[in-house]
């Protein structure tokens, strides 16, 4: 443990010596709008960084992902360091970032412009440390992660990449201390209710699309979901109508089913479909249920070397560990039987809002954490397994 602390102290010193470059990278990437399916400009910026740092085998694939390799001394294994390029903010939003009170403010910086910028900084940190890894480090900026993207970028990469990946580390901007090594089963969908403009007030049913959706919500929330394994229905967002005095003729609900059991999610999703059909018959409103994303439950054990080494690094750095399942790129690694974890870089506030922010000091700790985990999992050279 004392040797690990010495290593981390050296890494931290190097990281802090590069703080101007690290912040510049974060701002350069963070000020580029990068909504899901619109990540091209951010990916191009990362490609420019890779070329400047002489990262090898830089290329983009058909899904728009960017990858490059930092060759290892031995090169018998390949560790993928992955960050998604998309954010939840559209192109029309002002993406100007500001630095004040030791924080970076701006839309998408926490999720996941900062995570993407880490890929731009890692080659510089390794070069400054003058300590090459034994394994090849494959840096991957992936597209189509959030919402309807359904992890499309990382799934395409893992299915089509010709280099076998032995382990993965997924980088998220927040929250420092997160340590995910499992994924929940999940089904994500959007339900739209439409009522005719000319409403028949004599018929049974709802007087607006919002009330129609509410009927579905009430029935769905009455489903007898088990506590073990933990299972929930998350009603994420509802939108409908335009005025106080006119009934809503269309409304939409965004929701997720989550459980540690694939079977339970499958059964619950089928029951939701039945509820929608039943409500449609009663109200005579028109419903459209669009299921567009899913995850399978799974993961690696708590005693896996990736998890164990990450905990040791976090403990030495004084980072409070918050483990639990993740909906990140980790799920795609799990589907393919590749050991992987997800970690956060720094602390954030109001991360889903335009005025969201991240801690600058936390970034240095988060990067020290990342490099420590990389070296800890690389120490065996060609011996042992990830």
Image: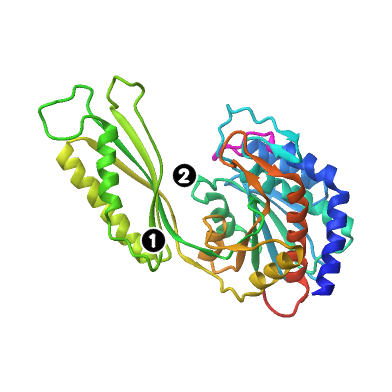
Quarter of the rendering containing residue 304: bottom right
Q: Residue furthest top?
A: 245
Residue 256 within the segment the image draws in magenta: no
User: Where residue 306 appears, x then y in whole percent?
Assistant: 66, 70
Left or right for 155, reference 361: left
Magenta segment, which residues?
Answer: 30-39
User: Where residue 361 appears, x then y in whole percent?
Assistant: 77, 48
Asked if residue 274 can be seen in this view, the reply is yes
N-terminal of the pair, mark 2 or mark 1, is 2
User: Where residue 9 appears, x then y in whole percent?
Assistant: 85, 62
Q: Residue at x 69, y 64 (%)?
A: 79
Q: Residue at x 58, y 59 (%)?
A: 158
Asked if residue 165 can be seen in this view, the reply is no
Quarter of the rendering containing residue 41: top right
Q: Please name the colour scheme applied to the rendered image.
A: rainbow
Return the mark for residue 148.
2
Q: Relative to the observer, which residue lies in front, 52 or 177?
A: 177
Left or right for 332, reference 252: right
Q: Where is mark 1, residue-wise?
A: 231
- In this rendering, the label closer to the viewer, 2 or 1: 1
Quarter of the rendering containing residue 303: bottom right
């Amino acid at each position: 443990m004392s040797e690990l602390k010495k290593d981390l102290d050296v890494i931290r010193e190097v990281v802090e010596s590069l703080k101007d470059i690290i912040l510049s990278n974060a701002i350069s990437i963070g000020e580029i709008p990068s909504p899901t399916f619109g990540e091209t400009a951010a990916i191009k910026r990362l490609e420019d960084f890779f070329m400047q740092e002489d990262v090898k085998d830089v290329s983009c694939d058909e899904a728009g992902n960017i990858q490059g390799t930092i060759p290892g001394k031995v090169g018998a294994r390949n560790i993928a360091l992955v960050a998604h390029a998309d954010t939840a903010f559209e192109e029309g939003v002002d993406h100007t970032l500001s630095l004040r009170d030791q924080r970076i403010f701006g839309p998408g910086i926490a999720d996941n412009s900062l995570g993407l910028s880490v890929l731009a900084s890692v080659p510089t940190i390794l070069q400054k440390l003058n300590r090459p890894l034994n394994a090849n480090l494959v840096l991957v900026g992936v597209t189509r992660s959030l919402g309807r993207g359904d992890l499309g970028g990382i799934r395409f990469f893992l299915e089509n990449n010709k280099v076998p990946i032995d382990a993965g580390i997924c980088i998220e901007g927040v929250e420092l201390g997160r340590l995910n090594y499992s994924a929940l089963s999940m089904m994500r969908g959007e339900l739209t209710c439409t009522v005719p403009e000319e409403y028949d007030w004599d018929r049974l049913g709802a007087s607006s699309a919002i009330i129609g959706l509410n009927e579905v919500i009430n029935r769905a929330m009455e489903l007898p979901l088990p506590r073990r394994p933990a299972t929930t229905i998350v009603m994420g967002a509802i939108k409908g109508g335009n005025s106080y005095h006119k009934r809503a003729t269309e409304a939409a609900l965004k929701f997720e089913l989550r459980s540690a059991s694939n079977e339970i999610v499958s059964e619950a999703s089928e029951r939701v479909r039945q509820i929608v059909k039943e409500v449609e018959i009663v109200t005579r409103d028109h419903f459209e249920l669009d299921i567009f994303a899913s995850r399978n439950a799974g993961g690696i054990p708590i005693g896996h070397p990736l998890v164990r080494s990450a905990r040791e690094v976090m403990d030495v750095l004084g980072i409070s560990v918050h483990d639990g399942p993740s909906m990140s790129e980790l799920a795609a690694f799990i589907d393919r039987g590749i050991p992987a974890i997800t970690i956060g870089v720094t602390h954030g506030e109001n991360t889903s809002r335009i005025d969201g922010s991240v801690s600058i000091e936390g970034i240095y700790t988060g990067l020290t954490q990342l490099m420590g985990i990389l070296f800890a999992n690389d120490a065996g050279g060609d011996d042992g397994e990830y």
